[in-house]
């Protein structure tokens, strides 16, 4: 028995719309559950204009295939065909959702509380002009992996000069139990300085005390050695309510 192309088209369109809507709901839910910041709408744009349309296309094709499988020729077969068509796109979206939840990074805690990193970058006077240090485009960051590279808040109103050294306070959340973290600060239009942090993946009460100032680097040279700078930094972890 030949299928009805009108029924096949209806199933395919309904399946595409359902797949798109499910992808949007799952995508937004994942952003909320995983604390993914929607900077400049980038996350939402990806959901609505990349992943959503991709799943809609899969839903459309699979809807036509389901109509062929059931040889849908009467409207009484619509719901059965639509149910079969739902299997593939829904399975793909829900499998992706489950994978992301299982593999999500786990944030460190201490005494049941979330942890912030509080740091002070120490820049000798003359390393960068005050205007560049205080500029709104000067930025700090904390790298803990490809999926955890966050900007840190630069407390510009607390930047001070002490004994010929600019003290630049930075603060941000520890999002993952990472064995390797890099703290960086970039005065506007100047070279970035970076501290390779020996902070343990799961901080303890000892890490709530300020560390001694440690040297920062400008980069890594071709031979693998560090390109030193005159900047230093110290840091500690701070318990905060979740």
Image (cartoon, helix red, strand yellow):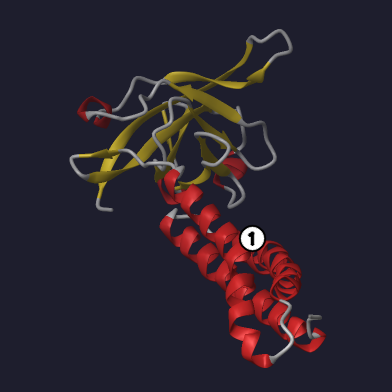
Q: Say if 123 sits above or below 65 in the image.
A: above
Q: Tell me where residue 66 appears, x and y as whole percent.
A: 70, 71
Q: Residue most toward the front? A: 1
Q: Viewer-proximal residue, 181 or 58?
A: 58
Q: Is residue 185 left or right of residue 159?
A: right
Asked where in the image residue 82 lies, by quadrant, the reply is bottom right
Label 1 residue SS: helix
Q: How many marks?
A: 1
Q: Tell me where residue 34 appears, x and y as whole percent.
A: 44, 53
The residue positioned 62% from the left and 42% from the top of the image is 132
Q: Tell me where residue 62 appears, x and y as whole percent.
A: 71, 68
Q: Residue most toward the left? A: 111
Q: Tell me where residue 183 appears, x and y as whole percent.
A: 50, 31
The residue positioned 63% from the left and 91% from the top of the image is 76
Q: Say if 178 sits above or below 157 in the image.
A: above
The residue positioned 38% from the left and 41% from the top of the image is 106
Asked where in the image residue 227 lies, by quadrant, the reply is top right
Q: Say if 76 sits above or below 209 in the image.
A: below
Q: Viewer-proximal residue, 213 or 30?
A: 30
Q: Quadrant of the N terminus?
A: bottom right
Q: Is residue 143 left or right of residue 224?
A: left
Q: Say if 88 sits above or below 137 in the image.
A: below
Asked where in the image residue 89 lies, by quadrant, the reply is bottom right
Q: Viewer-proximal residue, 214 or 175?
A: 175
**Residue that carries the numbered disc 1 in the rendered image:** 42
Q: Residues within 10 Å of mark 1 (few under 14, many from 20)?
A: few
């Amino acid at each position: 028995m030949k299928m009805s192309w009108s029924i096949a088209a209806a199933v395919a369109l309904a399946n595409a719309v359902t797949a798109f809507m499910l992808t949007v709901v799952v995508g937004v839910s994942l952003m909320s559950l995983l604390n993914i910041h929607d900077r400049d709408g980038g996350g939402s744009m990806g959901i609505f204009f990349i992943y959503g349309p991709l799943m809609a296309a899969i839903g459309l094709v699979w809807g036509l295939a389901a109509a062929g499988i059931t040889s849908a020729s009467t409207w009484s077969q619509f719901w059965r065909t639509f149910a079969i068509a739902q299997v593939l796109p829904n399975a793909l979206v829900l499998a992706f959702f489950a994978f992301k939840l299982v593999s999500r990074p786990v944030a460190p805690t201490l005494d049941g509380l979330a942890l912030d990193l509080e740091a002070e970058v120490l820049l000798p006077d003359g390393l960068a002009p005050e205007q560049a240090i205080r500029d709104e485009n000067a930025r700090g960051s904390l790298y803990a992996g490809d999926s955890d590279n966050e900007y840190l808040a630069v407390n510009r109103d607390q930047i001070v000069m002490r004994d010929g050294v600019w003290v630049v306070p930075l603060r941000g959340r520890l999002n993952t139990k990472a064995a390797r973290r890099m703290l960086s600060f970039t005065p506007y239009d100047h070279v970035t300085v970076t501290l390779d942090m020996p902070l343990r993946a799961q901080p303890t009460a000892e890490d709530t005390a300020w560390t001694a100032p440690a040297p920062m680097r400008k980069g890594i040279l071709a031979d693998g050695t560090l390109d030193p700078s005159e900047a230093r930094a110290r840091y500690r972890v701070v318990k905060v309510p979740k």
